[in-house]
Image: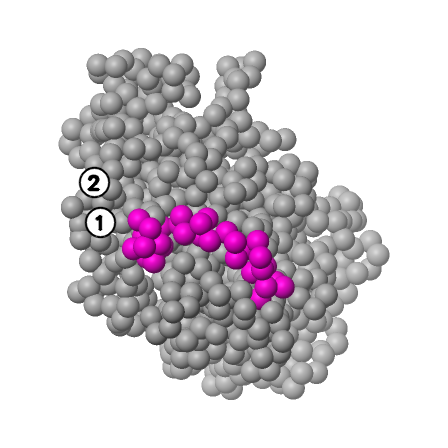
Amino acid sequence: MKMLWRVAGLSVAVPLLAFFAGCSENPASQPEDPGKNPLSHFGDASSFETLLCSSPVGGAVTPEPEYLNVGSMTAVIRDFQPNHPDFENFSEEATTQLEYESIAHLDLIYNYVTRTGVAMKDNGYGDDWYTAVPYHASCGTVSANAKYGSGTQIGVDGLPMDENTNLPEYLRQTSAGPVLEYGECNFYKKYESGQMIVRGYKNALEGIDYYSCEGGKTNWANPVIATTGMVSPYLTFAKAGADGKIDMIDGVTISKLNERCDNANFDQWFTDVPSVNKRVNTTLNLIKDPESDDYIYSRGYNNGGFFPLDSINPSTREWVMNKPCDPSIQPNGMCEQYEPQSLSIYCPPYDYQYARTQSDEFQQNTYELCAEWLNQGGPRAINSNGSGHSAAWQAMLAVTANKNTRLGLQHIRNFHFTMMTHSTFKYDAAKQAASPQNLKFVSSGDMWVFVDGVLVADMGGDHMPVPSQVSLQVLAANNHGCHDGEPLATYENCKGSTENAGWADGSVHHLHIFYANRQTNGSEIYIRTIPVERATYRIEPLSMNKFEVVKDSRGNTQNRIYMNLPFADSTVAALTSRNLPSMIVLRDGTDGKTMVLGLYLLSLTGPTANENGEQVYQFESVLKDLNGNTVEGGLLSMDRIAFNVPWSQQLENGSDADMYFGDVWAQMMAWSKLMSTYIVSSSGKQIVRFTANNALNKLVGSCAE
């Protein structure tokens, strides 16, 4: 079973978006038999189901699709809880002394009691944490770097300002400075959800491939410092199997080199440990850069952050549910993970002096959310008040209920996880001569990158986003990973290589990335790599190809829709909330007038891909009028159906209005005002109009049987 989910190099990833086979911990969202073919519920459809009515095949008009090159990296994510002793240590605060008093934040945290009587020392910041100051001080934070020389400052060219002897000699370049700074830009940027604050580098040189603030203008910016030397420069690999192949996923071990930056339990980070972590097998999809051969994965502050275990509404940034996964590729055949247990706001566990004025990227004040989090036990409290939910979860619920706001849902996240990814890339000597290729990375958490089992990027610790760049030309010329005694020196990647000439042209090499997110001050990752294989996804506008009404052998009537693409999991969750009129139905009366009704989903199962590659969903629904009254008899022959879209002035005044009589359009706009979210495909395409890719599907046949 393990081999089913692995990909050779960077190849096309199978979408893992079957929500009802997913990982949600909410029992109400699970079907009776997760993962079961929704069309097999009644056995052979031709024997047990009767087609009552349907729209003609191809009833929807689909514009020309776009084509998008996509690659993937095999990934293993391990989910942790925030009370793990290596997580949420607030190392910066533990080693910083306040400017206006001769007292350290360490004491403030240890002695802090909230206004409701919750003591931080009872919720993860007690004696064990307090006496671990030397550990906290070994992290490359601003204060520890200034006081103790911990960590390595990163220069504006992305190179470390101190030589890193943990890397091979040919990768030990250093920067003359000045130090690179990252922070909040002093301007807003327009997103679909409105104006938002953005973050980026203040003074990065052009060679750093990541977001920079325009003109270097920032409200605040902090130096970028990494904690190097935490891990061994060599991976350990299991013996090759009978086929001569090494298991590049479960046969790989990364080892601790130094006790540094709260890594006492490092042996648990990238290993399956029952009761400590939960494993999720998945893939990361990388998009091809149109201007090069590179493939890129980029998730940062400005586009929602890196949260591979969460499903997040891309428009509102609200948490929707645990990220669905494919149970067939999990070690035990089940999808397991913890609920999101942290908040994406800076909320240290003491009376933080700026807490009352701090705002998020939406310019919303976060004081009450932070205060409630601390009142529930703080960042490490995973079972506040015996509820079974974390303090962050409780705070999210409380603020949402008290203020009727999205604030809590916009910030609840699963921050605490590690990830190991593997892929391969091909060395093309000719391309290096014309335009040398580079592997580029950025990370706000611990990240270590290995090529052929030998360290090439050392970005340990919790920090501002640290950049790193590795030249393939340099690796090849120095025969990287193929020297006697190195982990894969006798493996296929080194076939044909020599000490003098370096890598053989066309040789394939192994890329392993290890990442850990241990603190709730950000989750950013950027990967730019070279693939072995290239695959093409067809990215189409989302459309309903066909709509059917069927009756099963028990007399139950159900609806079925054939989509060109699967829904995004956030859309599935929204549509099954039962309070959204997800579709509109135009019904012509005998008097010549048209009534517009709303279709509400009661259940949704699928998708299942049919022989034509269509994504088939089966669902139950109820039909209502604009007054909220249920329309008996359900759908009728000649009804016209389309997906609903949220109202906007642009929609109401747009060209679609010219296609309908005024009273019909007014009814359609009334239904639009009841629709609060766009219907989105797994590729991110939204349905925004009633025409073109959302043409009305007319039912023909005896729907009312």
Q: Nearer the viewer, residue 580 or 77?
A: 77
For the point 72% across and 65% down, the residue is: 386
Question: Magenta segment: does it hold 264?
Answer: no
Give left or right: position of 684 versus 425: right
Q: Which residues are magenta?
A: 120-149
For the point 33% across and 44% down, the residue is: 441
Please identify the dominant SS of the magenta region.
Answer: helix
Say whether residue 258 is visible: yes
Q: Nearer the viewer, residue 378 or 667?
A: 378
Tell me the kind of residue under disc 2: Thr
Quadrant assignment, res 610? top right
Q: Secondary structure at mark 1?
A: loop
Position above or below: 25 against 460: below
The picture places residue 649, in percent across and down from the top left corner, at 40, 82
Q: Which residue is mark 1?
A: 155
Give left or right: position of 125 versus 135: right
Q: Which residue is mark 2?
A: 174
The picture places residue 323, in percent across and down from the top left corner, at 57, 54
